[in-house]
């Protein structure tokens, strides 16, 4: 299974993003409204300038208080973002996300962000694959193939 198949299975089409100059409050409102865990930070909506997660916001509130909500997203975003392509395998994503200890990864094809996958998307896909393999093996054991 590859990333393009993960993206097709997601209910939300497109990429939600904020601009580097938007406030943390604006970003938090968007995260809450769409019940997601991270946003792409992009000046033009096509290239990834950074990524901002709910964890980034909570950590900053814990460090400096709620006054940080008026800061710009560029101040809290992760600027060095690890990305994948739509042709990458789910297994490679699991490895990158586990080793990097992050939960969201932008999908970039031809220099443009085309989606975001979460560790939840990856786990769900792996469970589905394991269930399908299990059903096929069970059918073979019972002579249904």
Image (tube, rainbow, N blue to C red):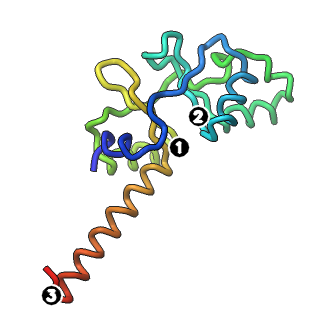
Which residue is disc 2 drawn over? 38
Alpha carbon distance from label 3 to label 1: 41 Å
At 59% from the left edge and 19% from the top edge, which residue is drawn?
Answer: 18
Horizontal arrangement in the rendering, residue 70 relative to residue 74 (left or right): right
Q: Residue at x 37, y 62 (%)?
A: 128
Image vertical order of residue 44 relative to residue 107, above or below: above
Question: Is disc 1 surrounded by few (<14), some (14 to 19) or many (20+) residues within 10 Å?
Answer: some
Q: Is residue 121 left or right of residue 21?
A: left
- Which of marks 2 and 1 precedes in the sequence? 2
Give the crowd class for mark 2: few <14, some 14-19, many >=20 residues within 10 Å. Answer: many
Disc on the earlier residue, 2 or 3: 2
* Tag 1 and tag 2, C-beta contact below 8 Å: yes
Task: Residue 76: give x, y in percent of width and height.
Answer: 67, 23
In-front residue for pair 2/99: 2
Residue displayed at 31% across by 39% down: 4
In this figure, which residue is indicated by the disc labeled 1?
103
User: Closer to the camera: disc 1 or disc 2?
Assistant: 2
Q: Secondary structure at mark 1?
A: loop
Q: Mark 3 or mark 1: which is in front?
A: 3
**How busy is the neighbourhood of tag 3: few (under 14 within 10 Å), some, or many (20 plus)?**
few
Mark 2 vs mark 3: in front: 3
Within the image, what quadrant is residue 20 found in? Answer: top right
Q: Which part of the image, by quadrant, shows the C terminus?
A: bottom left
- Residue 29, image quadrant: top right
Picture coordinates of residue 122, whole percent (x, y)? 42, 51
Asked whether, in this view, residue 58 is left or right of residue 50, the answer is right
Instruction: Identify the residue position indicated by label 3 in the image.
Output: 143
Q: Secondary structure at mark 2?
A: strand
Which of the pair 85/144 is nearer the observer? Answer: 144
């Amino acid at each position: 299974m590859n990333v393009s198949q993960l993206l097709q299975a997601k209910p939300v089409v497109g990429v939600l993003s904020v601009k580097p100059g938007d406030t943390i409050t604006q970003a938090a409102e968007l995260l809450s409204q769409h019940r997601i865990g991270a946003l792409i930070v992009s000046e033009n909506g096509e290239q990834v300038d950074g990524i901002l997660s709910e964890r980034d916001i909570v950590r900053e509130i814990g460090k400096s208080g709620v006054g940080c909500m008026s800061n710009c997203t560029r101040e809290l975003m992760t600027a060095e973002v690890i990305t994948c392509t739509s042709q990458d395998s789910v297994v490679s994503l699991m490895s990158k996300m586990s080793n990097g200890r992050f939960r969201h990864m932008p999908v970039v094809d031809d220099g443009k962000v085309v989606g975001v996958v979460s560790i939840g998307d990856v786990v769900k896909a792996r469970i589905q694959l394991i269930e399908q393999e299990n059903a096929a093996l069970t059918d073979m054991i019972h002579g249904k193939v």
